[in-house]
Image (cartoon, rainbow, N blue to C red):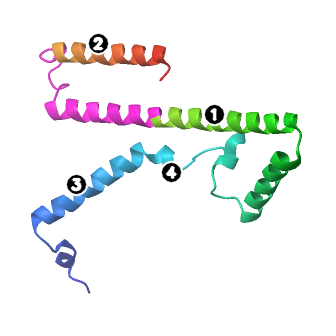
Amino acid sequence: MTDPSAKLSGSPNELIGSKVKKVVKSVVRFATNPLFSFAGPRPEFEKWSVVGYPLSYWVQLAHDQMRIYQQGSYAEQVTSRALDFAEWYRAITWLQGAIWFNLSLLITILLGFYAGRRRVFEDVSRNAAWIRRATAWCLGLGILANFAGI
């Protein structure tokens, strides 16, 4: 039988510090998740992600590109370059959207934590000014971001 107190070795500060590190690590992983993984269905730019493709696919792709740029016509080269550009553009815009979505979720969660910490919703009439101010700021920033295309 193992001693349950063996799991809690270390000072209380070390235990709290390790929990804070885990929370920070989770928040960073949540905010940067779109940079490192592609969840959900993959669109036509899935060649962009190296994960899941065998080496033979990349070798064949490299040979096709070398053939086009060594022996292909000018039209083939321009078409290949345009398709590559369009594929990368779609990948980048998709990634930007995923980053902004996760970032907005993170900001919303942090704003909720702050409001909970201040106990804003326990006495709404007393905190009505803060709620109005936060609503105005968030709405204004949201409208500006929408018009800016972010």
Query: Left or right: where does residue 145 sit relative to residue 5?
Result: right
* Amino acid residing under circle 3: Val
* Amino acid residing under circle 2: Ala
- From this view, report whether residue 112 is shown above or below residue 135: below
Mark 2 and mark 4 lie on one chain; the one further toward the N terminus is 4
Image quarter hosting the N terminus: bottom left
Dot 2: element? helix
Q: Percent position (x, y) of residue 94?
A: 58, 35
The part of the image, by quadrant, that contains residue 19 is bottom left
User: Disc 1 vs disc 4: which is toward the camera?
Assistant: 1
* Amino acid residing under circle 1: Tyr
Mark 3 and mark 1 lie on one chain; the one further toward the N terminus is 3
- For disc 2, the marked residue is 136
Q: For marks 3 and 1, give the CA distance.
A: 38 Å
- For disc 4, the marked residue is 36
Q: Nearer the viewer, residue 49 or 38?
A: 49
* Amino acid residing under circle 4: Phe
